[in-house]
Structures are given as C-alpha cells and as structure tokens.
Image (cartoon, rainbow, N blue to C red):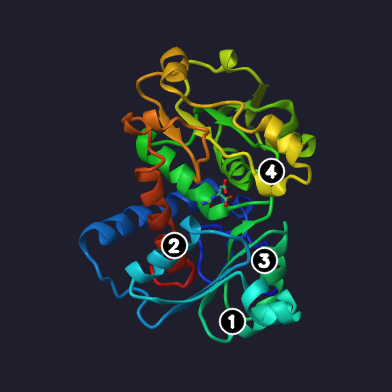
Amino acid sequence: MSNSSIRKINGNFRGKDILSLEQFDANSIKKLFTITAKMSKIAKHARPSDLLKGNIVTLLFYEPSSRTFGSFSAAVKQLGGETVEIQNPQQFSSVSKGETLEDTIRVFEAYCDAIVIRHPNIGTAKIAADEAQFVPIINAGDGVGEHPTQGLLDLYTIYEKFHKLDMLTGVIAGDLRNGRTVHSLLQGLALESNNRIYLLSPKELRLKKADFFYYKKLGLTLIEIDNENDIPKNAHFWYWTRVQKERFKNLAIYEKVKNRFIVTQKLLKQKGNTHMIIMHPLPRVGEIDTDVDKDPRAVYLRSQVRNGMYVRMALIAMVLGKTG
Ligand code: NCD
C-alpha cells in the first residue's frame, strides 16, 4: 500500500505488502511458520475453512504461470475466499489497449482485499505497492528480482526437515544470475547465522557480483564452484534450478549453458548423503533426472509443492489480519 511498500514485517503482517525477503527477520519467519503448520492441518483435515469468507483476492499475472498461479488460487479457496483471476492482461484486457500498470492496480484494488502480481520486469511489484492505496500487494515474481513466497516455502521445507534455519550447508545450482527464487532464498538464509552455501553454475550464470557481495555482507558464507566434484558431501539440501530461457537475449548462449549440471542417481551416490533433501522450485526442464523422483530425499514434487500452498494460505490470512 502507498508509502508502506518497504515496511519491515517486525512480527506484524497485517496490511503489509509482501515484496521481498528483505522485509523479514527471523522472528517474523517463525511466526509465519507457526501459522503455516496450522494451515497444513486445515488443508488436510478441516476443509472448507471460512477464515477468508467474504474476501476476494485478485491474481494479476503478466507472465506465464500455472504452478504459482494455481497455488495462490487454491490457497484462497482452501480458506473459503474467492479470486478474481487475470492472466496475460497485456494480451486480453485494457492493458492491451495501453492501460498503464498504475491504472490497472487502481482498478483492481476497487474489487478486492489483496492483489497478487507477477510481472516480467524487476521492481514492478514495488511500483504496484506504491500505487495501491487500500490493499496489500503480494509479489509473485518480478522478473529477475525476487519471488518471496517461493523463498518462504523453500525455507519452510528446509525448516520442516531440519527444525532450524541456521548452521546449514546447502548447494544451490543452475541459473543463479536470473533465477529470482534463488535471490529470495539466499536473502532468507542470510537471516540466521552460520549458513554455508555452495553456488554451482557455469561462469555465465553466476550471481551478479553486486548480489554476491550483498548476500555475503548479510552474513552468508558463499562458495562459487563450477564443477560437480566440488560439491560437499555434508549438504543439508540441494536446490536445483532451471536455466531461465526467457531472460536470454541470445539463445545461442542459452543452448551453451542449459543443463550443464544435472542431478542423477550417480551424482547422488557420489556426492549425496542420507539426510539431505533435494529441492527444485519447478518447472523442471531436465535439471533433475526423472529417475531421482522416487528417491525419498526428493521433495520437489512432494512436500515442497504442498508447502507452497500452506505458506500462501498463512501469508494471505496474516496480511488480511485474519489470524489474530
Ligand atoms: C519459478 C519462477 O517463476 O521464478 N517458478 C515458479 O514460481 N513456479 C522458477 C522458474 O520459473 O524456473
């Protein structure tokens, strides 16, 4: 909402925009996770809930999405709320007639209690938040910027398994330069101490230097590697990501760097351990062999997806002040 777009959460979610993991602190994350655990019980055993009865949430998606879109839509419905769903407004609505983002936000906020926005340009969720006067804005991915709800569900998945978010060793692989989920996850991991992250990518897809130093300054130990041999054997999690084809101006470069590192049974035997989990924000396009899916350590098509809906249920209920 106007002038509140960069407000820290500080344990109080009510009325706040959710734009970046930067707004969070360890205590706010714990608060969110307590409600998330309750939401998982509602989704599993106590449907339909009427927590969001009478509430409408607009999903305004300027970029293709089925997973995140579906997850938000289901999250609202799990809690008895309703959605106004707009996909590709640049093709099918007044936006195609030249309406500005600012006007679109002012129009849709008249219809609902919160707006979830995905957009191809970095910074757009913040612009929307500055424009909206009455309803909170939730960033569902702004270009190569951030994807805070994905970061939060990734952190929840790690927390669910290890009951902590500090003293972790992780491997994050793939498109670290363009992958917004990576940016949110790193920002989240920096909230607690002694986290050591190995960044595995071809040189072309490394974090931007400025980002690398920024996360380092926040307290993360970051080790850039470009060879699978350098993966540590004691990782708590592997987080593999898709090379973001849509962000490449030159597709020849994409072809050169795509699928350089693939999780296979063989790699798991060489470099894995029995306690770790294997994560992926999805969609996967070849970065993890389908053979690996049946491995109990592979959570990407299991708890990680479900946790996405639970975290979004919790977040929406909290920003709408429905959780006390
Ligand atoms: C991610 C995204 O959109 O950034 N996907 C998602 O949220 N479902 C990751 C990706 O597209 O690779």
Give the mark nearer the N terminus: 3 vs 2.
3
Tell me which amino acid carries mark 1: Glu
Q: Residue beneath label 3, please? A: 5
Q: Residues within 10 Å of mark 4 (few under 14, many from 20)?
A: many
> In the rendered image of this protein, does residue 103 appear above or below residue 154?
below
Tell me which amino acid carries mark 2: Gly
Counting from the top left corner in percent of width and height, residue 176 is at: 66, 37
Q: Residues within 10 Å of mark 3 (few under 14, many from 20)?
A: many
Q: Are marks 3 and 4 in contact (CB under 8 Å)?
A: no
Alpha carbon distance from label 3 to label 1? 15 Å
Counting from the top left corner in percent of width and height, residue 22 is at: 64, 51
Quadrant placement of the N terminus: bottom right
Q: Are marks 1 and 4 in contact (CB under 8 Å)?
A: no
- Write the residue at 57% across / 77% down: 135
Give the mark nearer the N terminus: 3 vs 1.
3
- Write the residue at 66% across / 44% down: 245
Which SS class for mark 2?
helix
Q: Residue beneath label 4, please? A: 178
Q: Is residue 35 left or right of residue 248?
A: left
Which disc, if any, is residue 70? 2
In depth, the one of 232 and 91 nearer the eye is 91
Give the mark nearer the N terminus: 3 vs 4.
3
